[in-house]
Amino acid sequence: CLFELFTRGSIHAGSVGLSLIVWVCGGGICALGSLCYAELGVTIPKSGGDYSYVTEIFGGLVGFLLLWSAVLIMYPTTLAVIALTFSNYVLQPAFQNCLPPFIATRLLATICILFLTWVNCSSVRWATRIQDVFTVGKLLALVLIIVVGLIQISRGHYDALRPSVAFEFSEDPSVGQIALAFLQASFAYSGWNFLNYVTEEVVEPRKNLPRAIYVSIPLVTLVYTMTNIAYFSSMTPEELLASNAVAVTFGEKLLGMFSWVMPISVALSTFGGINGYLFTSSRLCFSGAREGHLPYLLAMIHLKNCTPIPALLLCCIATIVILCIGETHNLINYVSFINYLSYGVTIAGLLYLRKKRPNLARPIKVNMLVPITYMIFWAVLLGFSLYSEPVVCGLGMVIMLTGVPVYFVGVQWKEKPKWVYRLLEKVTYMGQKLCYVVFPQEDTSETEPLTPTRNSFFYINACSSSFCFPVFPN
């Protein structure tokens, strides 16, 4: 879904050739970032990704701002857009001559979100199996597009890819527009850091985390670039921009009676994408609650299934709210800016940690040129994006900065009225009984925090009722 959105968005580059360069360079930049995340993932082996690293390195306020923007806008909006894409592709056969009704798409998207939330609440094994199966389905659909595109090229249908034509600009692209093309392409690659969100659930993370990164980033870059080449082998830039569903238009032109394969493939792909985002976003909420930046109910897991049910329910509710708002696509530019900003802050944390803790054990240690190169590109890209779209990027900053007063009132202010603590205690207790959740037993032998704990609660385990109750200090 995001890939298709930003296949159209990459036309900000102004020509076919430059848009393909943007895709390749975007994958290369993600590769540099993933190398930095591999070092951070084994140096600070905590789930939560960007949020956990920034919190450990820069402190609670910066970490909370990343958490706030992710929970409030980034993940719910992305989930809503993918769910709407899923419903559009599923409903398309029933509404061939018109767009599916607004209510129908929202209803089906909501049902999909609710179903996958139930799956993730019921079993981690089911959620990961769904992810594995539908990821394979997604790759098979992309491979089909690539193979058909290569057949087209072998037959001589590659006029749009000839250098003389590919670099014909419809209008002279500004540096700001090229920066926006990079920003949107980088958002299509988003997900390269998701494994860092579940580091504590990965078997042998010091070995498997970097291995997964080294294999996935080059593979995804190759597949995305080849898919774009396949699209341009049979579609003009104007057709691509006009299409509401690029893969379906491609299938209708080249697959004939088998064109139905494309909407089904994209629907399956988006279904797996929703599952993946639910899985990782709930772990982010879980990590934030464990640090004391979100209500502690979100740090609890089901007594038998060991799934973070409260965190999953929060992600589900936030996504449904965004779906009801309706204008989800308008939020994508804000999300792109916030997403890329968080990457830069995290990798800046790597450089800062290298200076402040040079003797810290680092099973993986990348060359300093890697984070420095990434930060230079990041600064240039964000600078030109701000210059080109000051309103969009400015609103993205405003969304993030609204978390500052929330942090000082909700986290830093320790002397709250007693009725506030009593209310929180009652809500936590009711949530525990409703979701049948408890605090997980932590193994402190494997993870030593770099900064003192910021939790303002102390806990005791009420074994007689199988629940944990928060005990507030005097």
Image (spheres, rainbow, N blue to C red):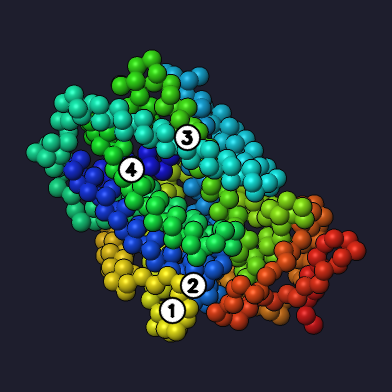
Whether residue 26 is situated above or below residue 1 in the rendered picture:
below
Q: Residue furthest top?
A: 257
Mark number displayed over residue 268? none
Q: Nearer the viewer, residue 230 or 132?
A: 132
Q: Earlier in the sequence, mark 3 or mark 4?
A: 3
**10 Å crowding of disc 1: few (<14), some (14-19), many (20+):** some
Q: Which residue is mark 4?
A: 224
Residue 21, position as x, y percentages in the image: 22, 49
Mark number displayed over residue 43? 2
Q: Earlier in the sequence, mark 3 or mark 1?
A: 3
> What is the secondary structure assignment of the residue under circle 1?
helix
Q: Amino acid at mark 4?
A: Tyr
Residue 14, position as x, y percentages in the image: 20, 44
Q: Earlier in the sequence, mark 4 or mark 2?
A: 2
**10 Å crowding of disc 3: few (<14), some (14-19), many (20+):** some
Q: Amino acid at mark 2?
A: Thr
Q: Is residue 402 visible?
A: no
| Residue that appears at 60% across and 73% down | 447
Residue 59, position as x, y percentages in the image: 52, 77
The alpha-carbon separation of the residues under discs 2 and 1 comes to 10 Å
| Residue that appears at 42% across and 46% down | 330
The alpha-carbon separation of the residues under discs 4 and 1 comes to 34 Å
Q: Which residue is mark 3?
A: 137
